Amino acid sequence: MSHEFNLALLIGAAVLLVCVGAVRLSVRLGLPSLLVYLLLGVVIGEAGLGIEFENAELTRTLGICALVVIIAEGGLTARWSTLRPVLGPAVVLSTVGVAVSVTVVGVITHYALGVGWQQALLYGAVLSSTDAAAVFSTLRRMPVRPRLAAILEAESGINDAPVVILVVLLSLPEGSHDPWWQQLGLVGYELAAGAVIGLVVGLGGAWALRRAALPSAGLYPLAAVGLTVLAYAVGSVAHASGFLAVYVTGVVLGNAHLPHRRAMLGFADGLAWLAQIGLFVLLGLLASPSQLGKAVVPALVVGLVLILLARPLSVLVSVTPFRFGWRDQAFLSWAGLRGAVPVVLATIPLSAGLPGAQTLFNVVFVLVVVYTAVQGVTLPPVAKRLGVTAPGETTDLQVESAPLERMGADLLQLEVPAGSKLNGVHVDELRLPVGAVVTLVLRDGGAFVPEPQTRLKTRDSLLIVATEQVRDAAERRLRAVSRRGRLARWFAEHGEDRRQ
């Protein structure tokens, strides 16, 4: 037993280190890292090193645990000031959009592949969920308009909840389903109750953490993650949506003024990476390469329906009332990234022993691999082609710093893009609010502390320290000067941009 345990530790540590190194390689090649993890799982599986793993029920259980951590990290790092303006379209896209996508994929799959209605609708339900890990890791490296990035992140955090409910209902044996109106009422109850539970746990947890005076700074991140898991557990016990409870709790805690907030976010980020690595490798291990060949054609058919018809139609129906232009809608349609979530959801009917579930799992696995590679590589040029990039936007830098923690401040990075009217502006002409300051300018491979009369140049990279109270105002001011230059105030420009 000791030898087997040590061997398992050796393989686990080796896989983890390879996956950590693969992140840098995937970024350099422009490929989503999850593909590397899935491939590694296949390599160490039955077709590679010969490790046999066929426990779909265990995979589903561990997958759900990993998704809880990944969704929690997404909620903790979401900024309410960015999320609030897009909450309406994100909720509609996560509910009405899901219903449209399930219907379109289900109907066409039924007639194109000749499968029964239950299995066809399962295809639609499993594939209607965008993947939080894929969306977070991709968009946070891309200079996309804040409004578009926010709605995609919010959608990926919210839409898991209704999709999981649909998949569970559709995985029940035929003849055991309640009337449609009861099922619709059940979905509504689970979503509403999950949101309320998440709000209560988040507010109560924030209140407690501010007053707890824990003896070690390392306990605060543990408590924050523990609260998100508590939200999931309470939601599940109450027959509510645990995933939605997790996301809401994460958003509340992430935007509360908590002690050691930076340490909390750093811990959640590392834990989410570990969950992603373990989840994707496990899913690759569960797959049987010998069975995947037969799934290629159905996967391509279903994938084309999903990407070219179901996703664009769901976006059109959901966000048109909120005045999103066709360019924004085209990007939202193409950026609906799939990842581990559909594969995890495919294990639910597989563990339930539903007829055709193995074929469903294989098709979803192949589809995720193929289309994640295509969408992940093409997303930056598509965004640039559609004109939805925003190279002049500030981005967070995750820096562990005790002084910043005590100040309640954030460290931001801003690059001066070509065409920006920040070019030629003096630092003192930025007129940043009190509490925000440009601390360092990186130019031509060197760095210097700017003077008030330092003139900014194209491709300069600025490091800006801003307190939490003035961060949003500082970003609005920088956005305004980037568009209008030093005369932004005279044009009544305060940074608002309806496109963003």
Image: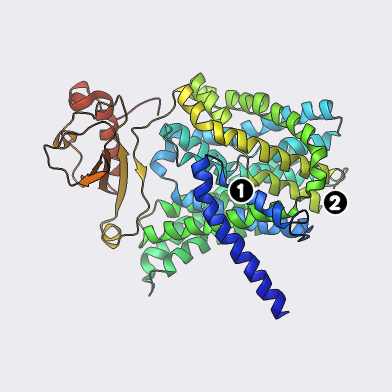
Comparing 498 with 426, the one in front is: 426
Most foreground residue, 341 or 94: 341
Mark 1 Cα-neighbour bin, 10 Å: few <14, some 14–19, many ≥20: many
Q: Is residue 43 above or below residue 152?
A: below
| Residue 76: % across, % down | 46, 52
Its colouring scheme is rainbow
Q: Secondary structure at mark 1?
A: helix
Residue occupying the point 76% across, 61% down: 51
Estimate the x, y position of residue 205 in percent, counting from the top left: 46, 61
Task: Find disc 1 in the rendering and name its residue.
Answer: 36
Q: Residue furthest bottom?
A: 2
Sequence-wise, the earlier of marks 1 and 2 is 1
Q: Quadrant of the N terminus?
A: bottom right
Neighbours of disc 2 within 10 Å: few (<14), some (14-19), many (20+): some
Q: Quick check: can you spot residue 199?
A: no
Residue 408 in sight here: yes
The three-letter code of the residue at mark 2 reads Gly
Judging by the rendered image, the residue that carries numbered circle 2 is 353
Q: Amino acid at mark 1?
A: Val
